[in-house]
Structures are given as C-alpha cells and as structure tokens.
Amino acid sequence: MRAARIPVRSGRLPTISVLLALAAVCWVLVVLQMGTHGGGDPGTIGFFVGMWILMMAAMMLPSVWPTVLVYRRLEAARRERGEAGVPMGSGLLLAGYLAAWTAAGLVGFAILQAGRVVQIDALSWDRSGPIVAGGVIVAAAVYQLTPLKDVCLRHCRGPFGFLLEHWRPGPLGAARMGVRHGIWCIGCCWALMASLFALGIMSIPWMVVIAAFIAAEKLLPWRRVATTTVTVALLVLGLAVALVPERVPGLTAPQDGVQQPEMEMTS
C-alpha cells in the first residue's frame, strides 16, 4: 500500500468530532451511573464490565483518533484503487480496541476481588493500606521509565506504521487490528490504570486525571516532556497517598468491602 495515494487531510475534523462526541456521551453515562451506584465499589461483574466499557470509551476515544483517522485514510486509498472497502470498518476497529481493554479490566477486577476475599488484616486501610496503594502508584511511575513503556508508547503514537505493518483486510481484519492496537495501548497504559484502581476505580475526578495523562502522552508533540511530567506527577501522588492520604483529594479507601471517600472517613 503506497502512502502517496492516501488523501492527506480528508476526514480529520469529522473523525475527531465524532470520537469526541461519543466520548462525551460515555462520560455523561458514567457520571449518571456513579450517581446511582456510588463512586468506589466496582459492584458485580456484570455492572463492572458495563461500566468499564463506558469508562474506557470515555477515557480512550479522545486519544485514539489518530489511529482511526489513519485507518480511514488507508481504506480510502484502497477504494481509490478499486478494491473493496469495509463497511463500518472504523467501528469494528474500535470494537476490537475496546474488547482488548475489556479483557484487561476483567484481570484487574479479578485481582481486586481476590484481594477482598483474602482480607489480610495487615493490608487493611487503617494499617498499611495507604502504603500499598501509594506503592502501586510509585510502581506505575517507575514503569514509565522502562523500555517496554517506550516501545508501546511509540506504537500508540505511530498508527501509520502500525497499520501498515499489521494490516488485515475485511471486517474481521479491522477487528483484529483493533485488538492488536488495544494490546499495545494496554502495554503503554496498564500502570496508569493500576493507579486508578489504587485511587478508586470508580472515582470520576481521578478518571479525568488519568485520561488527561494518557492523552498527553499519546497526542502532545513533546513526547519526552509529556512522559516525564506524568512520571513526576505519579511519583508525587504515590508518595502523598502513602504518607498523607488524608490530604489527597478524591481518594477512596476500602472499608467493609465498600470504598468511601478518605476525607469523609477521617472527618
């Protein structure tokens, strides 16, 4: 597939607008569901999966538009050469992408539930819980500096090369490319999501913060500046959670199987 045949500017604004609109709808649905369910408890697996998909769509769609845009341009180039296009190919690409993140969310849910079943008293919130939560966030900051993070982030920031290398034709091919791109994205962002679990998986304010971190790393032209800024922010946040959790706004802490705002507990 020759890059010269790809329309350079076609579809940029419509693609970004549609993805931002979908993300906005998902944010509204997440906020409405949080109002009826509560901000800390992930609930049953059915509720969690539904909420997780909405959360991933809300958090990730604003930063995945370069991949969708490149896919649309490559499809346009194929149609210009008389090859068959893929109806709803962009939607299938996004479906595969969200499917990969859903699988990752189920792993996180299983780990969270296993921790609750074990109920190690030494790890309870009123003992070493803040240190454990802070340690998870500090570990996320350390991961930011690893070669694996760098490789995964380069794949996320370079969708043109990724799609050319992994191109698969047809509807199934679009979904498979979405899954593969989602796997690279998970490799890039799993530690940030682990931080969200530590801060309170259903916390709207921290969802917004983590989504902003992800968007900054993927979209800003100054990659190393963005990554370094996020790393420092995670390090400071992790130390604050471990040492002075009562001063961390919006932090949720587990109590009797349900997470409650740390500020309310201390007061």
Image (cartoon, rainbow, N blue to C red):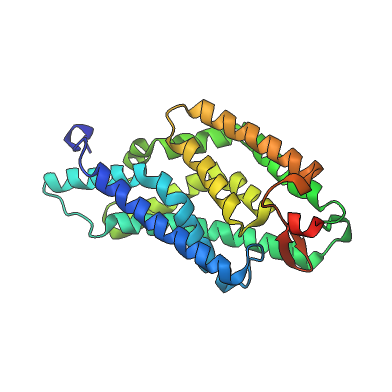
The residue sitting at 79% across, 59% down in the picture is 265
- Report the quarter where the N terminus lies: top left
Give x and y (percent) for residue 19. Answer: 35, 52
User: Toward which corner of the image does residue 164 lie, by quadrant?
Assistant: top left
Q: Nearest the camera: 68 or 251?
A: 251
Q: Nearer the viewer, residue 96 or 66?
A: 66
127 left or right of 84 in image: right
- Residue at left 36%, top 45%? 65
Residue 175, horizontal then vertical, whole percent: 36, 57
- Identified at 23% across, 57% down, the residue is 86
Name the residue nearer the viewer: 127 or 113: 127
Q: Is residue 172 left or right of residue 85?
A: right
Picture coordinates of residue 132, whole percent (x, y): 78, 49
Q: Is residue 117 above or below residue 216?
A: below
The answer to whether residue 173 is seen in the rendering is no
- Quarter of the figure with the C terminus: bottom right
Please say if 52 is above or below 228: below
Q: Is residue 177 above or below residue 152?
A: below
Could you tell whether 203 is left or right of 126 in the image?
left
Q: Mark yes or no: residue 189 visible.
A: yes
Q: How many marks?
A: 0
Image quadrant assignment for residue 73: top left
Image coords of residue 234 (percent x, y) = 65, 38
> What residue is drawn where x is 65% and y is 54%?
197
